[in-house]
């Protein structure tokens, strides 16, 4: 019997708060980084509030509505009422990379926030086109890649960049964030209903917000570290104003017709576009492992179109299918959470009330939901792959964990005023608390590819498919030699890709991954040799068995 698929369920409210907090963090990050590092403040703040935020909102609304509609289609096709829409929003990694390696360098060179914004738009639309084109080959990649290889990357990201980040936030601000965490753990690990049937995520946000405001009344904000006050609310209220989306295609065309300065940023745009394709592909696999099998091509194509739409209406920041579908499914969310998130994000961006929302509801009140989602993603990688493939999941996590460590070390150098480039030039084997800095940087570059490849190789070795493992090793060698993985150039603390045909930046520390490529080639030779030996031994045993039967 076909079950009726509802427009909105109680779990959608929890799902909304989780996704909304995630997207709100991205919007606040855009405001903070673009105003502090890219000159978009004072009179140039119009790029933020009149162009970038409305453009980001259009892309989020477009994607959220599509993925909600897609969930309704899948529910109708399967006759189920428990289908959860794919989560969607601004890509955090692309946001950071485009700020520090595209927008900020242009602003530093020209002193023009408008020129920096234009280059960001071009980078964004380039990434979107790569994502769209990648949708036509992604399903073939997905079919030929073991599930452990696709999910191990997500679990590594979930441990370092999601769970650990928000766990630290919680223990940094315990008076506001720990009680909401307790409510989340009770609701979703103990699976009990709260009084009056209140959703756990909604109650957690209310309790965290109330705690922050009560502490502020007793002047205890220095203890909690969370700043909420009527003065902040009044200041944020003054920033409101109607800012509808404005078409920015002419700005992109103007830059394309210029002297070609944008070509030097291709080395940033191409890998980020490819990473977004692979990352979204992994998230679609994660959704299927949780029970919702979405069409790969249409899911990725709309993801790419959302990024193109963002650029055409003023946002410099690509969107992506978010990590965490099984977490939102575990919250009980269906399609309504996606629709509501798109509508609310659009409302606060079009009305200039992003800062107002943040001044009333502190981020720490809702981060427990996102932490729980990270935990579920990590668990899924082990629970939904064959038991014998668990070692492959563990192997695939190493590059992602190394990438997280490299990010922490990079931030530490920035805060203390040190230079990773200087440290490595003085001692290439320098270690930070016993962890080799150079090795962390090599694993960080292209880690999404490396996680997947190492996990795939491990799966095929477990299955004794040595020739297939050798093929994956050859792919790894090609990526390393090309510079998509492992190779880097380091200028101060600015880490960038280094392609094989690209000239490095002046005075930068350069590492081309030729030796690592040779290492992968040795992998391939070893695995192929073992495969030949195995085939020979099998043939000998079959021959002996035939001779025995003939006698």
Image: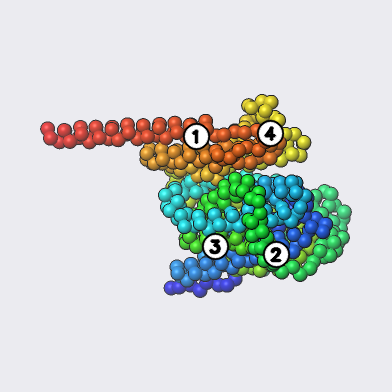
Spot occupied by residue 308 in the image (x, y as percentages of width and height) = 60, 60
Labelled pair 4, 2 in contact (Cβ < 8 Å): no
Task: Report how far apart the C-alphas of labels 4 and 3 lie in the structure.
Answer: 41 Å
Look at the numbered disc 4 and give the secondary structure of its residue.
loop
Labelled pair 1, 3 in contact (Cβ < 8 Å): no
Mark with earlier residue (4, 3): 3
**Whether residue 525 is situated above or below residue 366 in the rendered picture:** above
Q: Quadrant of the C terminus?
A: top left
Mark with earlier residue (1, 2): 2
Spot occupied by residue 439 in the image (x, y as percentages of width and height) = 59, 33
- In percent of the image, x 57 and y 34: which residue is there? 512
Spot occupied by residue 338 in the image (x, y as percentages of width and height) = 60, 65
Labelled pair 4, 3 in contact (Cβ < 8 Å): no
Mark with earlier residue (4, 2): 2
Label 3: how many residues lie within 10 Å, few (<14), some (14-19) or many (20+)? many
Look at the numbered disc 3 and give the secondary structure of its residue.
helix
**Whether residue 377 is situated above or below residue 483 in the rendered picture:** below
* Quarter holding residue 420: top right
For this view, does 510 lie left or right of residue 514? Answer: right
Mark with earlier residue (1, 4): 4
Q: Which residue is mark 1?
A: 517
Q: Which residue is mark 4?
A: 507
Spot occupied by residue 429 in the image (x, y as percentages of width and height) = 63, 26
> Disc 4 or disc 3, which is closer to the eye?
4
- In percent of the image, x 55 and y 34: which residue is there? 513
Describe the colour scheme in one phrase: rainbow
Label 2: how many residues lie within 10 Å, few (<14), some (14-19) or many (20+)? many
Q: Which residue is mark 2?
A: 54
Look at the numbered disc 1 and give the secondary structure of its residue.
helix
Look at the numbered disc 2 and give the secondary structure of its residue.
helix
Q: Which residue is mark 3?
A: 302
């Amino acid at each position: 019997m076909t079950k009726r698929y509802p427009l909105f369920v109680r779990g959608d409210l929890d799902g909304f708060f989780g996704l909304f907090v995630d997207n709100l963090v991205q919007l606040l990050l855009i405001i903070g980084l673009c105003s502090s590092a890219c000159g978009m403040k004072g009179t140039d703040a119009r790029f933020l509030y009149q162009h970038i935020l409305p453009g980001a909102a259009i892309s989020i609304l477009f994607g959220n509505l599509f993925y909600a509609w897609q969930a309704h289609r899948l529910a109708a096709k399967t006759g189920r009422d428990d289908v959860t829409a794919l989560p969607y929003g601004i890509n955090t990694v692309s946001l950071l990379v485009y700020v520090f390696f595209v927008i900020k360098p242009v602003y530093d060179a020209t002193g023009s926030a408008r020129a920096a914004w234009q280059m960001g738009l071009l980078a964004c639309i380039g990434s979107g086109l790569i994502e769209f084109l990648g949708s036509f080959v992604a399903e073939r990649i997905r079919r030929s890649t073991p599930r452990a290889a696709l999910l191990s990357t997500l679990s590594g990201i979930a441990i370092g960049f999601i769970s650990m980040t928000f766990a630290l936030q919680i223990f940094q601000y315990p008076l506001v964030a720990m009680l909401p965490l307790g409510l989340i753990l009770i609701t979703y690990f103990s699976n009990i209903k709260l009084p009056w049937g209140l959703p756990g995520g909604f109650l957690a946000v209310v309790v965290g917000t109330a705690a922050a405001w009560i502490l502020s009344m007793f002047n205890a904000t220095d203890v909690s570290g969370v700043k909420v006050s009527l003065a902040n609310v009044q200041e944020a209220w003054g920033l409101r104003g109607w800012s509808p989306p404005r078409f920015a295609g002419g700005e992109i065309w103007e830059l394309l017709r210029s002297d070609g300065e944008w070509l030097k940023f291709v080395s940033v745009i191409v890998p980020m576009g490819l990473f977004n394709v692979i990352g979204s592909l992994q998230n679609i696999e994660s959704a299927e492992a949780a029970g919702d099998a979405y069409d790969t091509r249409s899911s990725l194509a709309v993801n790419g179109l959302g990024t193109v739409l963002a650029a055409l209406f003023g946002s410099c920041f690509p969107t992506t299918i978010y990590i965490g579908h099984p977490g939102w499914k575990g919250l009980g969310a269906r399609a309504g959470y996606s629709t509501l998130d798109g509508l609310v994000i659009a409302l606060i961006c079009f009305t200039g009330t992003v800062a107002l929302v943040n001044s009333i509801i502190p981020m720490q009140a809702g981060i427990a939901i996102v932490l729980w989602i990270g935990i579920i993603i990590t668990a899924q990688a082990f629970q939904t792959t064959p038991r014998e493939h668990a070692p492959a999941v563990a192997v695939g996590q190493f590059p992602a964990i190394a990438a997280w460590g490299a990010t922490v070390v990079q931030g530490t150098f920035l805060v203390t005023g040190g230079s990773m480039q200087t440290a490595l030039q003085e001692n290439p084997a320098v270690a930070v608390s016993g962890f080799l800095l150079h090795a962390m940087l090599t694993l960080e570059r292209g880690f999404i590819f490396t996680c997947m490849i190492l996990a795939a190789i491990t799966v095929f070795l477990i299955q004794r498919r040595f020739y297939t493992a050798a093929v994956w090793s050859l792919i790894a060698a090609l990526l390393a030699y090309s510079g998509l993985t492992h190779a880097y150039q380091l200028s101060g603390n600015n880490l960038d890709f280094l392609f094989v045909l690209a000239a490095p930046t002046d005075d930068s520390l350069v590492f081309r991954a030729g030796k690592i490529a040779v290492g992968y080639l040795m992998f391939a030779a070893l695995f192929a040799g073992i495969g030949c030996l195995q085939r020979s031994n099998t043939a000998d045993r079959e021959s002996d068995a035939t001779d025995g039967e003939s006698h």
